[in-house]
Image (cartoon, rainbow, N blue to C red):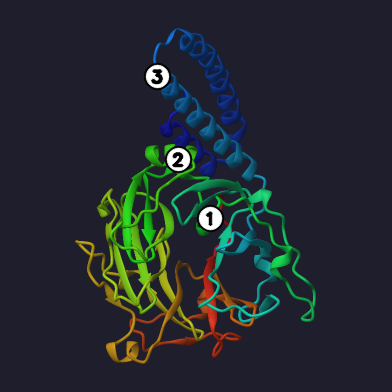
Amino acid sequence: MINQADVGEWLREINQRPDSAPRIIQEVARRLMELEKLNEQLRAENLALSTKYKVQQYKDRIAELEYQLNIIGKHLEGQAVGLDVVHLLVYNRRGQMLKLELRAKDLVSGAIITTFSGEFNLETEAVGLLAVHPQDELLLIFASGRAAGLPVADIPVTDIPPGQGKRLNWEESFTPTLPQGDDLAAITPIAKMSTFAHAIQTSRRGYARKIATKFLQQYVAQNNVGKGTNAAVAVDRPFNLILCQPEDILVLVSRQGYVMSARSDDVPVAADQAIRLAPDDVVVASFTLAGASSLVAVTQEGRAVRYPADWLKPAAKLGGRGQSIWSKAKQETGIRVIGAIAAKDDDWGIGLKANGQLVAVKIADIALGMSGKKEHVLKNIYPFDLVAFTGVRFNHRV
């Protein structure tokens, strides 16, 4: 049999000692043979069962084990993938996706990577950016709470047009099948799901809930992870799903510049208010620190602030206003956060401007500070409107 502990141990072994992969493949093959024998036994036993409930229990267990084996296979395949390559997804609520291949050696801080045709308007079209490993497995989460799996490899790479004259456009995008009447709310990499204790689901209006991994695996198999919202808040929608360990620090950042942080294990299992927001405020970023050394927040006009990770003061109780990135006077000027990330010095930030330009920013170029007074003007972005911002980390395994 295969259980979550086995999977976690194998993945840790591969990450620490890549040369152990052949031995682990042999072990997986042996377990597969055991699983096949078990399947035969279950088929025979099912013939004698008198209730549909027991049959379904067996089917669910088999599906869960087969899913875990599939994920292990993807991890093993990923060992051969170059670590200097990251795929950047540009997507919208209609599910349209463009996948760009980024290499660390090709990025220049402040340089324009490519340009999209037309202009983006935050009021009419929400656009998302997400950096993923080429061998990762994605979970598409829809506004209804329904979900669907999608391997990154199934999304074709969109070639970046050479020169400044040629532009990308949505006509070249890949669009997976969406549930009828639904739209895309979030995309989460889940290849490492079995190695985490739980996941935190967050909503646009600042609600959060904790889902144990064993339950999340069942929800994924059933193609429905739920909305993670409060039914009494009609305007809310799913925002993100974050894989966590109990000691990880969860961070939520609002558009008006408030930051709430807390231990992920302190998040309740039922959706509850994690950060108290003004009626016209929403969550624009949620993530865990995961060993990052700093918190980076970028404004809509292209200014950035970077605080050391210890600037965050994890709350003993969720539901408060959190810390403020800027002074009250600064917030009253109407300054707005478009995105925030947890970053290391050698990470990159990628910003999408309203005019369609995609720009790279080296995180180390943004000066560290302990207050919002020390802002950094992003080259080739300020003073133009940003519509999306995300972080990119090279030299890591899926």
Residue 181 numbered tag = 1
The residue under the point 51% across, 43% down is: 16
Q: How crowded is mark 3: few (under 14 residues within 10 Å), some or many (20 or more)?
A: few
Q: Distance between the residues labelled 1 and 3?
A: 34 Å
Regarding mark 3 in the picture, which secondary structure is present there? Answer: helix
As measured in the structure, the alpha-carbon distance from the residue carrying label 1 to the one carrying label 2 is 31 Å
Q: Report the residue that reaches farthest toward the left.
A: 316
Judge whether 246 appears above or below 347 on screen: above
Could you tell whether 90 is left or right of 248 in the image? right
Which residue position holds label 3? 54
Is residue 376 or residue 155 the one in the foreground?
155
User: Residue 145: horizontal and vertical position, in percent?
Assistant: 44, 51
* Secondary structure found at label 2: helix
Mark 1 nearby-residue class (10 Å; few <14, some 14–19, many ≥20): few
Q: Which mark is residue 194?
A: 2
Q: Which amino acid does label 2 sit on?
A: Ser
